[in-house]
Image (cartoon, helix red, strand yellow):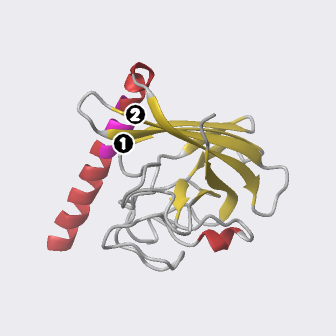
Amino acid sequence: MWEQQFRRSKLVGFAVLLLAVVGGCSHYGNHDISKSANATIQGCTDPAITGTATLKEFESEEGIKKLYVQMEVKGLKDGKHAVHIHEVASCQPCGAAKGHHDPGPFGKSTPDAPDFNHPFHMGDLVNITVVNGVGKLHAVTTRVALSDGRLSVFDEDGSAFIIHTNEDLYCDQDSELNPGCAGGARDACGIIEPVTSM
């Protein structure tokens, strides 16, 4: 019973996070960008998968740092695909990106290990939706940053985007009803690189 209540509270919390991510997009245009980064997306095994991602950090009126993530990818199968920021800036092979970026106490470095912190890793983002071979994602998060600090994607080994074969079901462990909670195999990868101001 306690386990069911715990899982229910985690799912409710993640639903609130998703609302915050979607709702935050409308406030992006009113703020100055403090830092930027880019990523070139490439297929893990399929060279037809290509794309780009931009990340822009800004500060809200309340002084909270937010990160706007915009991504466009071509060549993925139509439907929803999980998108996560992973903990190492390496795509050769895609498994070298290791596990989800999660500098908190529950972070793991084993990509496929049972991880009860999913879908609450700092690097867990919303799914990208692909229509007619083109996927677009727009999201705002406060759980990762470009600035120095514990949440930064630019730690000692950097970070990378991973796009998965299936959608993220936002569950905390696989089951017959929820196979592949975090999206399954890796379809594409992109190393996040800072944009230096001129």
Residue 1 visible in this rendered orientation of the protein: no
Residue 34 versus residue 70: which sits nearer the camera? Answer: 34
In magenta segment, residue 172:
no
Q: How many marks?
A: 2
- Please, is residue 69 above or below residue 45 in the view? above
Spatial CA distance of label 1 from label 2 is 6 Å
Q: Residue furthest top?
A: 30
| Identity of the residue drawn at 41% across and 52% down | 144
Residue for point 49% across, 65% down: 100
Query: Disc number at residue 18?
Result: 1
The answer to whether residue 83 is left or right of residue 170 is right
> In terms of image quadrants, where is residue 95?
bottom right
Which element type, helix, strand or loop, lies under badge 1? helix
The reply to whether discs 1 and 2 touch (Cβ–Cβ < 8 Å) is yes
Residue at 59% across, 65% down: 184
Asked if residue 87 shows in the view, the reply is yes
Residue occupied by mark 2: 22
